[in-house]
């Protein structure tokens, strides 16, 4: 029997923590009813382009870290793709938005032909598509949590031999204590690269004469992939350091029969759902209570707001896009959520439901403990 294919793109190269998140989500499925094909993307922006062009079924992207906070590149891409007045929507809205100075066009304009399946809660129904006409019809359909453990990879035998270290920019602040080791040279050079896996790849390709003075800070899987010795293990300051990843798609993620049946599995189905919403306030920043009134649409219905983040809208100075996450736990909450989403129309210039009631990964409650 030929298995159907699931195409999964992730922020690469292979060996990144995003790759680990993708494997966590889809490997168990690949053992059963599907053949999963993993493809590395050179950037988060390219992941959005690939999923929008339907060149994959799912895309896995980093969203936030328990130590460093939000991945602003991802938030900005959500803004650029889902804001109806952004550069990606410029052509469709140019007649109505003459008064707003829009940025120049950027990535490929989203296709209007694709749609979510309407068969489940995580899919975007016709109401969502109508209210967000002109924005992509893919969205957030799941999440994964990966414990971030950094390894010091080098062919050198001593720290004093190291002159250069390669790694991703966020890694430096996550390994402050280790990097303060007095055995390092005073002239130690730290070089930023696009991913931790890329840092390991660079070290692996050095000549024999260069290898003993260079190191990479990367994952255990990167060490295995590029066959670089580990000099020090788990060098991160915070042993509970965890990154949350989002899965983008057009349909629900196929559920593993093992995950459904095994109630002890960390990926078991959860009754807790997350909705990721973006909006721009209709009122100016001088209007008292405009944000409070908007958020009260949810709190007055006893809906739990899990997070709130702002990013510049890039439409006009000091106009911000807000991102909020809302928790729902039962059918009553879902009804209240829909009522709240209708009510906030009175307070916002626009809104987009980026992810509607996707499952809270049960690993959230144990993340950082491994």
Image (cartoon, rainbow, N blue to C red):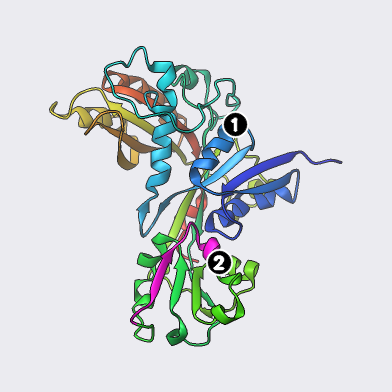
Name the residue tied to disc 1: 53
Q: Relative to the observer, which residue lies in front, 62 or 239?
A: 62
Name the residue tied to disc 2: 202
Q: Quadrant of residue 324?
A: top left
Looking at the rendered image, the disc whose residue lies closer to the viewer, 2 or 1, is: 2
Q: Quadrant of residue 198?
A: bottom right
Which residue range is magenta in the image? Answer: 186-201
Calculate the distance from the C-alpha at mark 2 to the C-alpha at mark 1: 31 Å
Report x, y in % for residue 206.
Answer: 58, 73
Above or below, 89 relative to 167: above
Report x, y in % for residue 262.
Answer: 64, 52
Q: What's the residue at 48%, 87% (across, down)?
A: 158
Above or below, 127 relative to 368: above
Q: Quadrant of the N terminus?
A: top right
Q: Relative to the observer, which residue lies in front, 123 or 270?
A: 123
Report x, y in % for residue 303.
Answer: 34, 35
What is the secondary structure assignment of the residue under circle 1? loop
């Amino acid at each position: 029997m030929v298995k159907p294919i699931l195409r999964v793109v992730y922020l690469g190269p292979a060996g990144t923590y995003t790759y680990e998140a993708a494997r966590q989500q889809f490997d168990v499925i690949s053992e059963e009813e599907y053949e999963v094909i993993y493809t590395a993307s050179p950037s988060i922006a390219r992941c959005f382009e690939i999923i929008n062009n339907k060149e994959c079924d799912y895309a896995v992207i980093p969203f936030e870290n328990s130590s460093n906070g939000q991945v602003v590149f991802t938030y900005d891409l959500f803004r650029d793709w889902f804001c109806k007045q952004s550069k990606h929507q410029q052509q469709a809205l140019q007649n109505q938005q003459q008064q707003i100075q829009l940025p120049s066009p950027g990535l490929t304009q989203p296709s209007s032909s694709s749609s979510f399946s309407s068969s489940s809660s995580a899919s975007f129904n016709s109401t969502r598509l109508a209210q967000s006409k002109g924005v992509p019809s893919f969205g957030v359909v799941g999440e994964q949590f990966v414990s971030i453990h950094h390894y010091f990879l080098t062919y050198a035998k001593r720290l004093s031999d190291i002159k250069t270290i390669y790694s991703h920019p966020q890694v430096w602040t996550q390994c402050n204590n280790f990097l303060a080791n007095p055995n390092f040279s005073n002239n130690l050079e730290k070089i930023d690269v696009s991913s931790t896996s890329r840092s390991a790849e660079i070290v692996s390709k050095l000549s024999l004469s260069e290898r003993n003075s260079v190191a990479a800070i990367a994952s255990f899987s990167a060490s295995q992939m590029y066959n670089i010795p580990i000099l020090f293990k788990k060098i991160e300051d915070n042993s509970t350091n965890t990154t949350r990843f989002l899965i983008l798609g057009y349909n629900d993620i196929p559920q593993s029969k093992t995950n459904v049946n095994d109630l002890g599995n960390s990926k078991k189905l959860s009754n807790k759902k997350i909705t990721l919403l973006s909006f721009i306030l209709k009122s100016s920043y001088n209007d008292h209570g405009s944000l409070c009134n908007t958020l009260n649409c949810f709190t007055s219905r006893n809906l739990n707001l899990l997070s709130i983040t702002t990013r510049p809208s890039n439409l006009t100075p000091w106009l911000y896009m807000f991102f909020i996450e809302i928790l729902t736990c039962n059918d009553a909450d879902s009804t209240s959520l829909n009522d709240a989403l209708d009510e906030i129309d009175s307070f916002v210039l626009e809104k987009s439901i980026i992810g509607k009631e996707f499952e809270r990964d049960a690993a959230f409650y144990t993340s950082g403990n491994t």
